Image: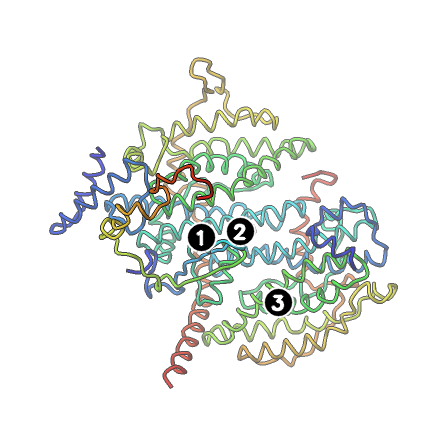
Amino acid sequence: MTSPGDSGARETWPLWEVFIRSSRGLSHVHAGSLHAPDETMAVRNARDLYTRRSEGVSIWVVPASAITTSDPDAKGEFFESPQGKEYRHATYYTKSDGVPHL
Amino acid sequence: MATSTSTAGSDIAAPGIAAADAAGEARFAELLATESRVEPTDWMPAAYRKTLVRQISQHAHSEIIGMQPEGNWITRAPSLKRKAILMAKVQDEAGHGLYLYSAAQTLGIDRETMFDQLLTGKAKYSSIFNYVTPTWADMGSIGWLVDGAAICNQVPLCRASYGPYGRAMVRICKEESFHQRQGFEILLELMRGTPGQREMAQESVNRWYAPALMMFGPPDDDSPNSAQSMAWNIKRFSNDDLRQRFVDMLVPQAEVLGVTLPDPDIRWNEERGHYDFGDLDWDEFHEVLAGRGQANAVRVANRRAAHDEGAWVREAARAYADARATETEGRIAS
Amino acid sequence: MSHSKHVVSTAITAETIAESHLVAPEAVALYALGLGDDALILAQRLGEWIAHAPELEEDVALGNIGLDQLGHARSFLTYAGTAWNKSEDDLAYFRTESEFRNRHIFEQPNGDFAVTIARQFFVSLYFDRLYRALKESTDPTLAAIAAKATKEVDYHLDHSVQWLLRLGLGTTVSHEKMQRAVDAIWPFVGELFSPEAALRDLDDGVGVRPELLRESFEEDARRRILDAGLKVPTAPFARGGGRDGIHTEVFGHLLAEMQVLARAHPGATW
């Protein structure tokens, strides 16, 4: 299953998903989407559309059709596994509460 | 819990997939009940999807059509600072239209289809943009009254249950914070200016006040879709509540400006803790809605012209991209 | 140059120039006036596009370019005005046609999208060469304005080159329109490199002699036109005259529209 906005070949310009790094040291975060004829113009359009107020220092664009998402119908099961594995979190280890630098 | 939602969903559901739908429906109801967000890949009732597509695309069309009444003054702005502000504002509106088209597109409708609906009159946009802008003061009134009303409407939409819509609205509200202020300041400068400028400001406020109040939609007892939208957490406050909130904000602002709001019935009501105001002329609202506003035909014709005249450009860019892709494939194959 | 670098870091604008109480020497002001008029008239033309671009994304892009140009214009005009105690708006709204100094290419009508791209391509390439040299100016204000503008113009050039390629190599229709557009704008290119009279009275190093930019401009322009599958026009360059206040016939109309409201309310503030 591709990105929810992908329109296949119906539109003259395909849809691109835009990811912006707001400052150095942070990850690129999804900002939205736009239309562009190719990747070169997609980056430029993203610059004009999503960084008009200095919101970013780096841009990724990805064709919406190239994104694979997890199966929405299996949502519950797919993300169920971490439940019950509380031992992955530091808060599980209560006996060491109060010990310095731990 | 959320019975109206369940009814709307099962009305539309095709037979045979009832079991999967039932699970999806329960999950959807739970998301609404817990004030969580619905995301594009979630199951949602067909009527919810349809309502969202209609509302978000109308909203996007309003931003795009809304560029015209203000674009009308970019080339004639009376100072270079005002010219820059107005250009930035109209450009923001193009951006906001794009954010909203993106949000609508996640519901499975593409932008070309939405454009087509706009150009053929199948989709509506806010009637306010069918009023004309004959004077510079209208740039002030649009900012202060029209954007002011829009912000009242939009701030609650940041919490709309549909995730992509809410996120688009957060970005839009943040960017629009300067829109209302710049309009207010245009009027403030005019009211502090020459008698001619003051007259221009008052005349413009006289024309825009009532249409701006009508932007919240018909009175609650005449707004058939409101209840459903509120149950779906798309709409968070009723039309009349938002309108009241807006008038309560406007009255003191008008005093700062020194303009008179064109309604003799405005007065503070101690008991209600709100300003009372006079009835609006809903006949005019319905007239404009029915296409008999000052600029309905012109707005759509201009949009169509831009779209049609741009077709060869869009096709050229597509052809260039296709040719380059083929070239790359050829190189890889050989 | 260290002074100008300091100004750059705080992003020079018309407002900061106005607040600095600088007074430009007369000859520098005349030079800045010409550069300011070029940018202002281009911004005015680009402002006409809004809501009419071939695609919404392009409305946003043209808006950005127009806003950048308007920013350059405001800085140059504000600085020029300090010599005569005039504001940017005095200069923009209350001069007559023959008092404007812009070169003809900037006032040429938008035409279709290809004409706008052709105009933008030539002027961005020219601005790129001009501002890169001007940011080394011995006049700190000119240097600071140019330093900010260089970065923006770099993007404008890239934008127009991308479109030159796509329209030149896209479809038969776009190829023809792009060729016609390049041919239509070409005659106005020559004037960009005619000598700046204002520089005669100034030391070397204050301004940039446009004659010196010509070779590098032409080489790059030719290469990019050919890369886009187009022919380099052979038509002769038109006689200019913009810097002397002689304009093409379209200019009076542009000015009438730009100034109409301000002139109806002389002395008013907005």
In this view, the residue in front, C4 or C204, is C4
For residue A31, the mark is 1
Q: Cα distance, mark 2 to mark 3?
A: 30 Å
Closer to the observer: label 2 or label 3? 2
Query: In the image, is C132 to the left or to the right of C171?
Result: right
Check disc 3 and report the residue beneath it.
C119
- Total marks shown come to 3
Secondary structure beneath dot 1 equals: strand
Label 2, residues with CA under 10 Å away: few <14, some 14-19, many ≥20:
few
In this view, the residue in front, C74 or C103, is C74
Q: Mark 1 lies on which chain?
A: A
For residue B173, the mark is none
Q: Mark 3 lies on which chain?
A: C
The three-letter code of the residue at mark 3 reads Arg
Q: Cα distance, mark 1 to mark 3?
A: 33 Å
Write the residue at 74% across / 67% down: C133
Query: In the image, is B104 to the left or to the right of B307?
Result: left
The three-letter code of the residue at mark 2 reads Glu
Write the residue at 53% across / 30% down: B206
